[in-house]
Amino acid sequence: MTPEDVETFQRCISVGGVAIFPADTVYGLATEPDSREGVDRLYRLKLRTPDKPSAVMFFQMESALAALPELGPRTRRVVECLLPGPVTILVPNPARRFPLACGIEPDRLGIRVPALGGELEPLAAVMWPVLQSSANRAGGADARRVDEIDPELRAGADLILDAGELPGTPSTVVDFSAWEEGGTFEVIREGALPQEAVVACLQ
């Protein structure tokens, strides 16, 4: 992957296009988080119902923290401990930011900051967040290579960034929306980050 690829990716996202791109886990679909047209297209490609939430991915840690200034101090420490990495963190969203990513729960937001090393390092230059979901049909298998992505989904995307074979295990999803006040969390989906690593971070 080259800086030119990343510039093309940013241009695609900026006009509400839908891109297939590599993350530190599996291949994903991305679009502009505030583009109703882009989000609707992404969901149609996935055959995903619009009430289901997606995550907002930031490619720089500083961008994630700047975009969510209302994060409480305890939640912020969790975010800084677990990210960047193969985890999706659900946080309180009292300002109802990125509503198109929240499904039917506007007060809760999923955020991702991938660990961008090796072939993926050029993506760290992406300045703006994307709404993202895995590059598969709803309920389908995650793709570690581009050729594993459903052909119709590939044909429907405006751009495909190919970084070769990825680890292939999706992100762990952890709900920290009650952490600030109640000190509780829930692992919604075990994935690339073991639960033990989450617990160790909190200690």
Image (tube, grey):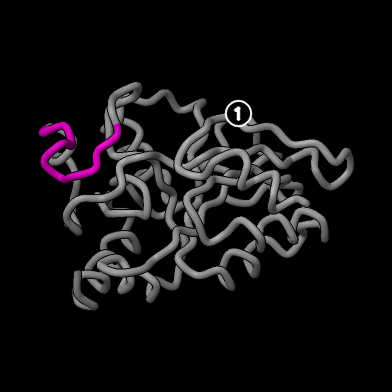
Q: Percent from the top left, x then y, of residue 10? A: 31, 67
Which residue type carries mark 1?
A: Ile
* Residue 164 left/right relative to 57: left
Magenta span: chief secondary structure: loop
Q: Percent from the top left, x then y, of residue 68? A: 67, 61
Residue beneath the point at 35% across and 44% down? 37
Residue beneath the point at 29% across and 69% down? 118
Q: Percent from the top left, x then y, of residue 131? A: 44, 49
Position above or below: 10 against 203: below
Residue beneath the point at 74% across and 60% down? 76
* Residue 85 left/right relative to 181: left
Q: For the N terminus, give its image quadrant.
A: bottom left
Q: Which residue is under mark 1?
A: 104
Position above or below: 102 against 124: above
Position above or below: 105 against 117: above
* Residue 29 left/right relative to 115: left
Q: Please state the extent of the stretch shown in magenta in the rendering.
A: 142-151
